[in-house]
Every structure is written in C-alpha cells, then in structure tokens.
Image (cartoon, rainbow, N blue to C red):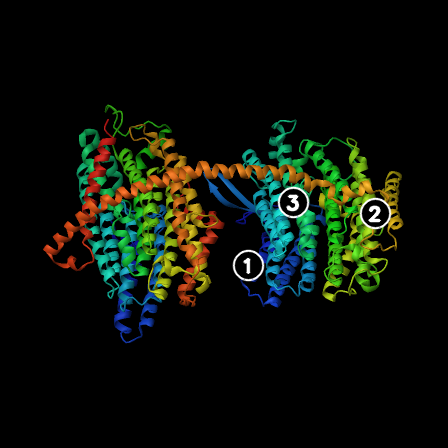
Amino acid sequence: MIEQSAAFTPQFAASSIARNLWLIPAVPMVASGIIALLKQPQRKLASTLAIGSLGFSLLLSFIAFAHVLRGWAHGSVVRETVSFTWLQFGHSAVDLGWVLDPLAAVMLVMVSFVGLLIFIYSVGYMAHDENFTRFFCFLSLFAGAMLGVVISNSLLLLFMCWEIVGLTSYLLIGFWYQKPAAAAAAKKAFITTRFGDIFFFLGIVWLFSQTGTLLFYNHGIGSLEPLSLAVLVTQHAGLGLSAAGAIGLLIFAGAVGKSGQLPLHVWLPDAMEGPTPVSALIHAATMVAAGVFLVARVYPLMAAGAPIMSIGAQPGGTSVALTVVTWVGAATAVFAALIAVAQNDIKRILAYSTVSQLGYMMAGLGLGGVAVGMFHLITHAFFKALLFLGAGSVIHGCHEEQDIRRMGGLKVDMPLTFITYAIGMLALCGFPIFFSGFWSKDGILEAAQHSSVIKGPFYLLVFGALLTAFYMTRQVCYVFLGYWRGPKPAYESPMVMTLPLVILAFFAMALGLIGTPAWPWFHAFLEGRAAEFSVHSLIEPGFLLLMATSSLVVFLGLGFGWRLYGEKSPKPEQPDALEKSVPWLWAPLRDRLYVDEFYGVTVIAFYAWWGRVADWIDRRVWGGIVALVAWIFALWAQLNRLLDINWVDGGFDKTCEELSEGGGLLASLQSGRVQNYLRILAVAVVALAVILFWSSRP
Amino acid sequence: MNYSDLFRATLPETALEIAALLVLVVDLGFLRKAALQIRTTVAAVIGVGGCIAAVSAVYAAGWAGFSAGSDLLLAAGGSAGVAQVAILVLTALTLLLLVDSAFTRNAGEYVSVVLMAAAGGLIISAAQDLLVIFVGLELLSLGLYILTAFNKQSGKSAEAAIKYYLFGGMSAAFLLFGFSYLYGLSGSTSLPKVVLGTYMASANGGAPLLYIALVMIAAGLGFKIAAFPFHLWAPDTYEGAPAPAAAFIASVSKVASFALLISISHAILWWPAMLHLKGGGVTFTVFPAGTPQPPVTVGFVTIWPMILMDLSVLSMVFGNLAALAQSSVRRLLAYSAIAHAGYILLGLAFFSWTNASAQAILYYSVTYGLTTIGAFGVVGVVERATGSDKLDSFLGLHKRNPLLAAVLLVLFLSLAGIPPFVGFWAKFNLFATVLNGGWYGFFKGPLSSLPAEALTLVAVAIAFSAVSLYYYLQVLKRAYVMPAGDESPIRVHPVTLAVLLLIGAAVLVLGCFPALLQNWIASFYPAM
C-alpha cells in the first residue's frame, strides 16, 4: 500500500490533480457568486455559467477518478492529501485540506455527473420561472458546497461545506417562498438538520480536544489514522463506549439529521415543496447522501475497537457505534417504507422511499463496511434521480398536478417518461439481474445475513424490500396505467428534460455490473484490493439461496401491488384498495404514523412554553434592569447638563473673553478650544503621574 | 560608524526622499502647464513608484541594521521590517486615493510631503535610540501638520492644522523632556542601555524621576497614537484634513507609532528575556555579584505597563462612548480610532517576551490601517457627492452605488470585529496574546499583572467592541436599510474604485485565511 501525501507548500510530491482538487468545488462556487450579480433577465448566461462550471468540475472529477484508478491498477491505494494551516493560536493550529482517495473520487464523479444532468434538466423545468437566475445561483452554490464536503480532508472544512449545503437546501426548498407550505418546509428542514448538527459539532470539538487535529489523514498523525484511533479507543466515555465510539455517534447524529434517519426524518418529505429538480438533486441523489458519505468517511472512527470488517462474509464482533448505525438504518428502512405505502403525492412517495433507502445504506455501512453502503449510495443516486426527474416530467406534463389519484394512463401520453420511469422503479424495487438496485441491495442483505451478532436487521430489511416493491407498483399503476383522470390532457416533456432521463436510465441498469459478487469491482476499488472475476462466488449455494429469497420477495411485492391496483384506475374520491381491505392500518400510515403530531405535542410544545417563559423573564426581569440603567444614565446626563451649563460653559466664556482680549490669529478660529486642549494635556500628565505615584507606593 | 552601512540601512528612506524630490522636479519643472488631473496622476504614480522601490529596499536590507559603536541605532527585520513594508504599502494606497481628489492644485508638493512623512515613519519603526526616535517623530509629525492644512480653500483644514500643530508641539516638548530625564538617569540614549541604566538609577533613589520621565514620554507617544487623554487633536484633525491626508494620518502614522512602542517594549524586556532564556528561572538578577538584591526593583518593567494599561482602559471606554454620539462619520472614525488604540495598548501592556505579542499588535495595526484607508476613501467619495460627511449623507448608498456600499459594509464590519473579516482575527489574536500573559506577570511587585487582571481587561475590551458595533451599524443602517431621499447614482473614479475594491477584497480574503498574514508577518522574524 503506497500512501502519498503533500503539504500546501509542495515539500511532498502530490500529483497535480490532487494539488488542484480544490478547483472542483471552487469553480461552481465562484460561478454562483457571478450569477448572484447577474440581473433577472440574463437567464441564458446564468444557466450557461452554472452548467459550464459544473461541466468543468465533472471533467476534473473524471481526471481525478482516472488518476486514482491508475494508481489502483498499479496495485496501490491512492490517498493524496494537501493541507495547510488555516489559523494558528498559541500552540494549536487548525489545519484545513483536501484528500483524493477512492471514496472521494467515486463521490466526485457521481455528484458532478448527476448534478450536471439535473442542471440541464432544470433549464427546461424552470424555463417559465421568473427567478430563473436566482435558482441557478443557489444550485451552483449547492453543487460547490457538496463537492467541498466530498473532498474535505478536515472535519472542520467538511462541517463548513456541510453547513453551506444546509443553507442552500433551505434556500432551495423555500425557493417558492410565496407558498406558505414551502416556507414552512424550508424552515423545518433547516431547524431539524441543525438539531443533528449540534451533536456533530460537539463531536468535532471533542475530537479536536482529544487528538489536536481535525485532519482525517496527515502522514500518520491524522485523526482517522491508527495513532489517534489507538488513543481514542483506550479512553472511556461512559455507557460502555470508548471516546472513539462516542465521537463517532455524535458525528452520526449529524448524519441522522442530514440523511433523514429516524427520528429526524420528518423534514425530508416536507422538503418536496421545493422545485422537482431540487428534490432530485438535493433530496435524492446528493445532499441526503452526504450523511451516509460522512459515516463512510469517518468509518475508521466508528469501527475502532472492533475487528475490521470487509465486504460481507466475515462474521465477527462489531463496535457499539456501528451497531447503533445498523439498527437506526434498518428501523428507518422499514418505517419509511410503511408510510410510503399510503401516500398519494407522487413526490412524497419518492421522498419516503428515499428515507427508506438511506436506511438501507446506513445499515449497509454498519453491517458490511464502507463499500457495501457506498455501492447502494451510488446506484441509488442514479435511479432515484431518475425517478425524481421522471416524476418532475409527469408533474410538468400534468399541469403541476402531484396527486397520483388524478393521473393515469400516462404510458400512452408520455411514452419515454414511462419507459425510463419503469426502469427506475424496477431498479428501486431490486428487480433481479438486470437492475443495479438488485445487486446493491443484495450486498446489504448478504452482509446482514452473515452478521452473526444480530439477526434482527436482516428480517427488517427483507420486509422493507417487500414493501418497496409494493408501494412502487402502486404508484406506477396509479400514474401510468389505467385511464387518464385529470381535467386537461397530459403531454410529453421537451427533449432537454427527457434526455437526462434516458442517460440516467442507462446507468440505473448498467451500474449493477460493477458490483456483482462475481466481479466486485466497486468494492475492490474502494477497499484497495484487486478485483477478481469468479463466477464461482455467484453460484455458491448460500448466495443463490439469498438471491432467490430476495427475488421472491420482490416478485411478491410486485404481485400484491398488481393484484390490488393493476389497471383499475380508482377515482380520487374512491377509497384506496388497501384502505378497503385493512382500514385500521391505512389511517395511521396515511397520517405518517403521527411522528409530526408527536413532535408537535412534545418538542414544539416545550419550546413554545419555554419561549413564553423567556419572554416573561425578558420583559419583567431584564427589561426592568435595562430601564433602571437607562434611568441612572438619564440622571447622570441631567447632572452633566447642569455641570456643563454652570461650569464648562462658564470656563468657555472666560476663554473667549481672554481670546477677544488677546486678539491675534486664534480669535478668527471658530473657538478657542485649543488652549483648553493644551491645559487638558498638562493636567493629564500631572494626573497620570499622581496616579502612578499613589498606586505604586510601597 | 560606517557611512556605507548607514547608507545601506537607510536605503528605503533614501528611496522615498529621492522620489519626493523627483515629484517636485517633474511637477514644477515639466508639468507647469499641464492639466491638474495629469499633474495629480503623475505625482501619485511617481510616489507609488518610490514606495515600491522602498519596499524592495526593505527586503534587500536583510537583518543588518545600523549601529554606532556597540549601540544599535536602526534595527532591521522583525517588527521594524513588517512595519516598514506595511507603512510603504499603506502610503501607496493613500497616494492612489489622491488621483481623483481636487482639494489642492499642488499635487506634487502634497505627494512629496507624504513621502517625507513616510520616511519619518520608516525611521521611527526602526529606531532604537532616543535621539533617532525624536528626529523621526518630528519628521513624521511636521509632514502631518502640513498635510492637514493642505486644503487651502477650507477654513476647517487650517483650523485643524493649527490645533494639531500646537498640540503636537507641546507633546513633543513633553517627550523631549522625558527623554532628557532618561538620559540623565542612565547616561545613554540607546534603548537597551537606558532600560538597564534606569534600573540602576531607581535602585539608588531615582525612581520618582523615572516616573515623571515615563509619564512625559507616555504623553508624547500617546499623542501620536491618539490615546485618551492625549487624543484631543484627533477629531478635529480627522474632520478638517483632506480625506487622503486623514487616511494617511489614521493609518501610516499609527502603524509607525505602534512599531515604535513595540521597539520600546522589546527593549524593556530584552534583559529579563535574556536572563529567562539563559537561566530558565524567573528570578530577576541584573546586578553584579555581591550587590544586595532589592526585593522589587522599580523600573521600566513595573511602571510602563501600568501607564499603558491606564491609557488603554481610558481610551477604550472614552473612544467607544464618545463615538456613539457623533453625527459626522469622520469624527466617528476619529473616536473609533481612539478606541482601537486602546485595544492595541492593551496588547502592549501585556507584552510578552516571545514574538507573539509583537506579531499580534502588528497584525492589528496593519489591518486596522488598511481598513481605515478604505473607510476614508469611501467617506471621501460620499463627501464629494453629497457635500458633507454627516451620517445622513450615507442614506441609500447601496442604491446610489452598490459596490461602494458593499466595500463600506465589509470595512465597517471588519472594524467592528465581525468574522469572516480580518478585523475579527486581529482582535482574536491580540486578546489571545494578552490572555496568554506577558512577561510582566513574573514580577510580583505591586504592579504585577495577574491573569485575572488580563481577563478582566479583555472582557472590558470585548464588551466595548460590542458597543462599537452600534455606531458602525448606524452608518451601515443608513447605507442599506433606511429610505433615501436622493437615489441618483454616485460616480466613482475607476482608480479610486479599484483601490477600494482591492482593500475590501483584502479584508475579506485575509479574514477567510487568517494564516496568510500571520505567516507573512512571522516570516520577518528569525526562527526562535
């Protein structure tokens, strides 16, 4: 294993792409700044700048990826870091920097590629919006910040970019801020994720106080490298956790907020109030994946103290932090899938499905390691972006209608959208062999099955897969099959919107090929092993059984869905097919299992009460003190005025008299105060000397 | 004494003087008939060229300095180097602001006076000898009096100049009187020997004289940095002087004076620091073996920080409170300058024998000087457009000229110490070094500075910088929030705009990457 590194002043050799890696986030950010200065009508320029800058980032990302790939082909793990001192105080310094390693390279390509497609799509989708330039300004800033998160080699820099991502997410969700629902959703997203970020920040501070550095990798003394981990593991933080585990869990809390895991998932479905490209970019492909990426990035911290696990297979102990990650992920996967079953808004279904799939990724990280979780992240980014953009195309074609009960039969009106959407849907369900979702989800299931310690997550995840197939079938039946139930006929979207769909659809199928057990290229790349082609591991009986199980589950889900919904096209007024059969289950699911209501009567009610208390204290206690101080000052001012009139003015008049008596140059000046100045100077010297003598007497 | 050494050590000053003469020759000799705009531009360009030449001379000078016998007269490198480069850069910026000014028809004379004053600034930042200090100070001050009076059409300008001059003359007299006592006590004019000599003298009953001498010197230097109660000239001068001259007084003269105060503090700590480094202990023994060791020796180390601390607190409190009541932005800047001088004096009062204090103080004074030049630049532009520098003439500035308003926003927030602007890091570094405790803390005399004391004073400083936000925001509120009556655009000369944008960008970039300036300053010091 060769590890190359470099400092900011190039005393170590880093490849030129590693040294210039900062350009990848910087260019879209600068573009965003320029777009911010543009005037409203300069739409063409704004979109060109945004797309051009991200295209440039994509190009650089490909070069970076190729560089890492070349290193890997030569049998070494490329991990080049560039760091510089951002600020120094006393003996401690805060270093920032960036890193180029397989994890960053994969994410770079994914984020900039999916981002670029969504940028192009937005040109069509937002064509009639009057705030077109503002939209691209935010979008560019978001892309830059997200790419910044990906390349950060410092937890602090990552946190900064993370917060910019949070800010742009807020701005974009609330893009149509005239809609009260959008404004509320933006606020909710911001505050909820901020809740997780507080813990994240505590984790950062703790890590810095323990290791004295926030760099991940720094020639062996970074916080994720064995030296620091050894220190962290030996310290006990209570509750059976080591410091490493506790810090890992605090950081995970930040990821829970950003990636919409239980119990902070509530903001993500509401975030669908934003424009659809935003939902696709931020709330499907990239930003919500930032949480998963963060856990993958600090994985050594999470796993510290447990035997290192590689893909699937090895049974063994797992660290407390990873166990928590696993359970949270698995619970979220099922919980969100359940809710998705009973939603009627096309984007909301996808939103809950995203929450659920993020749960899969977290569980994959917890059970199978970085590669398993990241593979699902990458495949999901493509097929979920595809589904969201498809949904956007549907909404666009149906005159901004989002209720699936008012659609239907669109496979005739929107053939291209239908085909691509179907591909995305099958990939999400994990339809066997031909779709990427199958392989990435199977990886997670396999890891869950092999985990000897805990079996619970495995059953949860299998159940989640069944639900996924079911709710997606329901959605597709409502939207594309049957007959049209809307008022005006629907139409197919323009080329600029459908082309990205086709490209994404291709990847939704093809990406599976790089992560099959027969040729686990992706996992090998991330973990720095050579990829071996062996059909043998594919036809291993244990694995075949698993494949059969998961295929069976998917077919069951599809079958149920078809049986209940099929070509029936119920009217919007009619109760849902599931509602008819199990009404007692339907109501809680439709009402999102009352999580929002629960928060309403607990957290929010508490804050409202606390707000009233603080208000009372402010008015009565502090207000009283302020009034008192003001009163004292008013009194003082009165006193001053008296002194002024009787004393200073008197002196002033006297001076004036002297002046007019003396005549001369100064009399022509506006006042004779300069003599006073000089008197004050002399008096001050005497006074200072007196003070000095007095205070230093022995 | 070696004249070629002297020439090498004073190469930057020489470059400036040559440029000053050149400006006069070109302006009076060749451009008599030329348009005012051209004369101004040529003069400014030659002046900037002189500054650039002088900067390269500073870099070329290295670490040599200049000594007469065993006494160092002019230092090189270290704080002196930083201050000199900063002075030259700031001078060049104020000269560029001159390009679109119309307050004088004698731009050549103006530029040459600026350059000569800057040469005085260079001398006092390097001076290590009482006489050299005094000569340098006078060279600087005389230039400033002339610059203040340069707007001959304005009565205010003349009034401000005469006040400044009278006040300055009296302060200089105090300073010289104090210096003469020091010489009498120590028998030397070289700073390190003065410090050592006064220990000897005060041990033999000369302490009262030392008190008086130091108070007089504090008055003389307090005048230069406009510390309360020696600040009285500042509001009038800032208000009356032409804008580029006011910018020069508020920045260059401040940086030079603080560099001088750093030299004095260094000299004070030189003996104890040597002992500390050699012995590793904190016992204070400078007396020859056999002399009975007095329990507490009254000397520079015990008195000087006490004086500085008093001035610091008074300046912070008075400057910030008085600024609250101002309706003229120039006077507001003057009172805020008094407050900023108070913060820096706090750093000097808790000076440490490592380089950290000197670097933090330079960081503060350099960034403050830069920001102030920008602020006066904006004020100058607004003044010319509206005819006044009252707060209300800034109404609606963001509509009248968005870029100008943005620069004002950046600069004023930086002055108030808001991140991510450089003013925040300046305050942060300064207060951090104060809290890290100076060398003075080792002297457990009646004047020892305990950490609690430093903590209290830093708390006061932070509280008052919160107060300062109020009056800075008063200006920004008018520029951005309050409705404006007049929304006609303000035109800015491209050179002025470029300078202001450059300063604004520097304040932002240095604030985002605080280590840039830290490393640059540290690069002047030999590695410890």
Q: Which mark is residue A470?
A: 2
Name which of mark 3 and mark 1 comes first in the sequence.
Answer: 1
* Vertical comparison of B109 with B360: above or below: below
Q: Earlier in the sequence, mark 2 or mark 1?
A: 1
> Label 1 lies in what chain?
A
Amino acid type, residue under disc 2 in the picture: Phe
Could you give the CA–CA distance between mark 2 and mark 1, rounded to whole angstroms? 45 Å
Q: Which element is circle 1 on?
A: helix
Residue A565's place in the image compared with A394, above or below, is: above
Asked if the residues shown at circle 2 and circle 1 are in contact, with their CB atoms under 8 angstroms apart, the answer is no
| Rendered-image quadrant of the C terminus of chain B | top left
Q: Please indicate, yes or no, whether residue A476 appears anywhere in the rendered image.
A: yes
Residue B168 % position (x, y): 22, 51
Please name whichever residue, B361 or A432, is drawn nearer the observer in this view of the structure.
A432
Q: Residue at x 31, y 54 (%)?
A: B331
Question: According to the image, label 1 marks what residue?
Answer: A33
Q: Are marks 3 and 1 in contact (CB under 8 Å)?
A: no
Which one is closest to the eye, mark 3 or mark 1?
3
Q: Give the mark, 2 or 3, whose residue is nearer the N terminus.
A: 3
> Residue flagged by tag 3: what amino acid is it?
Lys
